Amino acid sequence: MQKVNTKTATIKKHQTHATDTGSDEVQIAMLSMRIDELAEHLKTHKKDNHSRKGLIKMVANRRTKLTQFKKKDVAKHAELTKKLKLS
């Protein structure tokens, strides 16, 4: 149940309007949340290579979304990366 609460809290924190669940900001924030959770998992389960591959795919997906978002709106990109502490 706590995972659902953190997911909805992340969506509410980054959405641009009341019914927004799929904007670039929300998608990047959700990917960042999942990446952080999986990185914590991999600290304790060092030999879990299947999860590691999934983590690498998520990081690549987030990087792609961030570069597309930067091309779309540089100011919002800078604000989002500062908010998510990515750079």
Image (cartoon, rainbow, N blue to C red):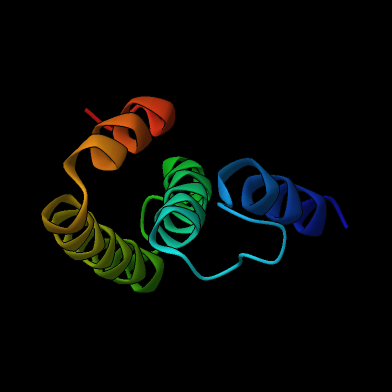
What x and y, as percent, mark residue 59? 26, 58
Image quadrant in which the C terminus is located: top left
Image quadrant in which the N terminus is located: bottom right
The residue lying toward the viewer, choosing from 37 and 72, is 72
The residue lying toward the viewer, choosing from 72 and 42, is 72
Which residue is drawn at the image coordinates 26% and 70% (left, top)? 57
Which residue is drawn at the image coordinates 38% and 50% (left, top)? 46
The residue lying toward the viewer, choosing from 56 and 8, is 8
Position of residue 33 in the picture relative to residue 21 (left or right):
left
Position of residue 58 in the picture relative to residue 23 (left or right):
left
Residue 62 in the image: above or below residue 50: above
Which residue is drawn at the image coordinates 46% and 65% (left, top)? 23
Query: In the rendered image, which quarter is residue 60 located in?
Result: bottom left
Residue 47 in the image: above or below residue 74: below
What x and y, as percent, mark residue 22? 52, 71
Residue 46 in the image: above or below residue 82: below
The residue lying toward the viewer, choosing from 20 and 55, is 20
Query: In the rendered image, which quarter is residue 18 located in?
Result: bottom right
What x and y, as percent, mark residue 10? 63, 47
